[in-house]
Amino acid sequence: MNHLTRACGGVLICLFLAACGPGAPPPADTPRNVIFLLGDGMGYAQVKAYRMYADDPSTELVDPLAMDGYQVGSVSTDSIRLDCAQKDESGCIRDPYGFTDSASSATAYATGQDTVVGRLSMSPSGEAITTIFEVARTQGKSTGLVATSELTHASPAAFCSHVADREQASDIADQYFDNQWNGEPMVDVLLGGGLDDMRRDDRDLVSEFREAGYEVALNRAELYETQGGHLLGLFAPAGLPRAWDRGDDVPSLAEMTEKALHALDRNPQGFFLLVEGSEVDWASHDNSVVGVVSEMEDFVAAIRVVLDFARHKGDTLVVITADHETGGMSLGRDDIYRWNPRPLRGVKHTPKWIIPAFLAGDVPLSSVVAKSVPFELTEAEKSQLEAAGRNETAARLAVTALFDRRTFTGWSTPGHTGVDVPLYVYGPGSERFHGVMQNEALGRTLWDVFLPSH
């Protein structure tokens, strides 16, 4: 076991990284590549809502999604949540009934170890925990992060940063460059949102990455012009717009994923790529069924790109899951035994776009909504929308309630829930994933399959 000492945000952190043992070849089922796809906030209801929305109505039964045939089990997203003896979170006792956040769950996947809510690849006592990214990089593999959130958001950040609080966005951004191996940043490809975190008054990381040899893209056209294996793409100040709200200058998650695969596959030693459909979570926090379907469509399109790649290559393990469920989403409500996707087919914009458009103008909310939906508003629905006035929160709730009533969608919370999330696996080593797995057990299995000599 070797030691790597590196500077992150001015603090020296010692990481213990296992070197490849000489001699013994890896097991026959060891994949050359791993692609880990995370639907943030994606529970079974979010998956089924999109399956029913995407269904071809001319077929007798609901058509399966690209990943449905590869479901092997589910993931339990418990965490070390409560009962810490000190404010520094030492002496934490695992609460078997506590639910996770993206930071602690992504840490479990990235390190195979659990931690308290809010921490990124740091133990409850404040020690850095080595991630699968970091070990893969020291073994000659390439690494990549693709997300629709800002790249400094909790899930992508857990794979290559170490902070006590997920809100330390500037520290996370700095570590993407400062966390290095053999004089180069640990992450070869970074594609997503978060330009404001990477280009700040105190530090311009965009310029630093460019000077280090990275191709930089700030819009969709520039992304398609890139040719190399080291990419930094930042396509929004923070998170990307919802998929149904994006203009032509913002790439889809599938397009970013395709570019990342093209760049990373140059390395004969293989790669580890994280792809996150980040805003399924954000839409679920908003209790927006329109937002959920928009972001699930974006995520499933990326899954199709990955599965096509993996089938063609034959040496790539694909793992698809979620960090937790958000919103307590239900299909069916008010004692109605059905769910209706039809009002969502043909929607032009999500409430995330509709509400700012309404507040920026002087026309009634019902008029703005009417231009974005494929159905005729009833007089009662117009009255309910107008009752919100020009209050942002009230307007958002009125619009989401409209779609909830039309589709028979229910929600139990604006926060996270503790229900298990689906697990889909394809490729060499897939037989190692099965049943109900704790999130840290899934992380350890990833390590064992991809890095058997660690």
Image (cartoon, rainbow, N blue to C red):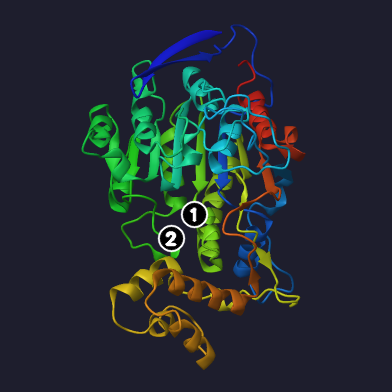
- 383 sits to left or right of 404: left
Quadrant of the image occupied by residue 124: top right
Q: Which mark is residue 299?
A: none
Residue 314 placement: quadrant: top right
Task: Read off the residue under disc 2.
Answer: 242
Residue 185, position as x, y percentages in the image: 36, 25
From the viewer's side, name the closer residue of 136 and 107: 107
Q: Secondary structure at mark 1?
A: helix
Dot 1 or dot 2: first in sequence order is 2
Q: Disc 1 designates what residue?
A: 279
Given the image, on which type of amino acid does mark 2 rest? Arg
Q: Which amino acid type is shown beneath numbered disc 1?
A: Glu
Q: Residue at x 51, y 8 (%)?
A: 2
Q: Is there CB contact under 8 Å for labels 1 and 2?
A: yes
Residue 50 lies in what quarter of the image?
Answer: bottom right
The residue at the point 68 percent across, 48 percent down is 418
Give left or right: position of 25 versus 192: right
Front residue of this view, candidates 245 and 431: 245
